[in-house]
Image: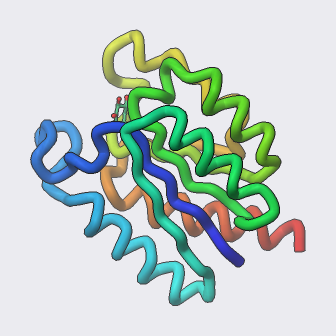
């Protein structure tokens, strides 16, 4: 089983970026922890980060026929991007949405969400630990179909 972990804009700044909201953990540390758990589960992880919407669309498209699942933190594009939503649908690859912060408890504009309706489910509010939770949830979901 192969899972692609895709991170959008500004998530490369984790560790320095608004630590009171996002914590002190870096994206690299999150990916290492997710990969460690994936190894225990016998799952392969590929990871990708971009600040560019088009690159994220292309990476999601390339998961079609290649990855079994996607873990996606689309950052601010979650709240704006029809293109990312369409790419998830076009890929046909089951996607779990992750956010470090609880987007439902923040500014009103973060309650607009183009990803959630096309995701298998959403994990938010648990900081970097949410990626491992998403992995476990996605692997469990995919195992049901096997
Ligand atoms: C985020 C939440 C988004 O609203 C925000 O734009 C981000 C990070 C999170 O992980 O909590 O960039 O996706």
Instruction: State the quadrant of the N terminus.
Output: bottom right
Instruction: State the quadrant of the C terminus.
Output: bottom right
Give the farthest residue toward the top.
Answer: 108
Q: Which residue is drawn at 53% across and 42% down?
A: 56
Q: Residue at x 22, y 43 (%)?
A: 22
Which x, y percent locates residue 102? 37, 35
Instruction: Say whether residue 91 is left or right of residue 112.
Output: right
Q: Which image quadrant for residue 114? A: top right
Q: Which residue is drawn at 18% across and 49% down?
A: 23
User: In front: 54, or 78?
Assistant: 54
User: In front: 81, or 102?
Assistant: 81
Q: In this view, does 135 lie above or below 42?
A: above
Give the farthest residue toward the right.
Answer: 146
Q: In this view, does 65 lie above or below 61?
A: below
Instruction: Say whether residue 118 is left or right of residue 7.
Output: right
Which x, y percent locates residue 70? 63, 56
Which x, y percent locates residue 84? 61, 32
Q: Quadrant of ligand 1?
A: top left
Which x, y percent locates residue 101? 33, 38
Q: Is residue 90 above or below residue 60?
A: above
């Amino acid at each position: 089983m192969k899972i692609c972990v895709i991170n959008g804009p500004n998530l490369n700044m984790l560790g320095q970026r608004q630590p009171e909201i996002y914590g002190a953990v870096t994206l690299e540390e999150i990916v290492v922890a997710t990969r460690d758990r994936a190894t225990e589960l016998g799952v392969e992880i590929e990871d990708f980060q971009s600040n560019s919407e088009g690159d994220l669309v292309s990476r999601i498209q390339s998961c079609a026929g290649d990855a079994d699942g996607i873990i996606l933190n689309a950052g601010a594009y979650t709240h704006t991007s029809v293109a990312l939503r369409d790419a998830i649908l076009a890929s046909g690859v089951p996607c779990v949405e992750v956010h470090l912060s609880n987007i439902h408890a923040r500014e009103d504009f973060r309650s607009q969400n183009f990803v959630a309706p096309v995701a298998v489910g959403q994990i938010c509010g648990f900081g970097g630990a949410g990626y491992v939770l998403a992995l476990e949830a996605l692997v469990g979901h995919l195992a049901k179909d096997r």
